[in-house]
Amino acid sequence: MIPIEPRPLDDAERMLLEYILRFDAAAAEEWCCQLDQVEVVGVQDDRSPSIWLGVAGAGRASAPNSTLALDIGVVGAEGGEIGALIVWVEDGVRLAGLDFLYDTDALPPLERLRISPSPDPREL
């Protein structure tokens, strides 16, 4: 991570994160309530849209065992998966990062995301 002067999420970053967070209906409000307090505090590098987050103030999910157990794939124009996204959380309660696992310098359009619940590793 390359630290940067903290800045608010831009509109596209916020829209993408909110779209992903709302997929988990049971905890959507728990996570989305942090968005007004999230700052971008670092970047991966100059080419990647991956960002590292800090949550100002007391913003956090209320349950310390909250997780974002989602598989987030990015689909190309021809329908095949071309990459993935990871939403990182700190201590299971604070948003910590949005990591892009594909070769791009731009955020994917929402219609190119394929989101599904991840299996609980305790149940495997």
Image: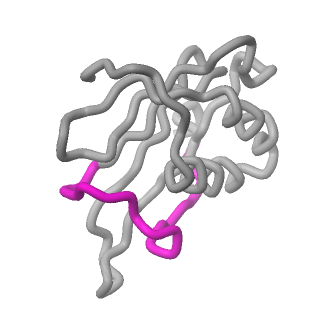
Residue depicted at 20% across the width and 35% down the height: 45
Instruction: Give x and y (percent) for residue 103.
Output: 19, 56
Q: Do we see residue 118 in this rendering?
A: no
Q: Is residue 20 magenta?
A: no
Instruction: Give x and y (percent) for residue 77.
Output: 32, 84
Residue at the outermost bottom position: 78
Tell me if 9 is positioned left or right of 63 in this view: left
Residue depicted at 47% across the width and 55% down the height: 72
Residue depicted at 48% across the width and 52% down the height: 71
Q: Quadrant of the N terminus?
A: top left
Tell me if 73 is positioned left or right of 27 in this view: left
Foreground: 75 or 34?
34
Foreground: 61 or 8?
8
Q: Is residue 107 magenta?
A: yes
Q: Quadrant of residue 122?
A: top right
**Magenta stretch bounds:** 101-119
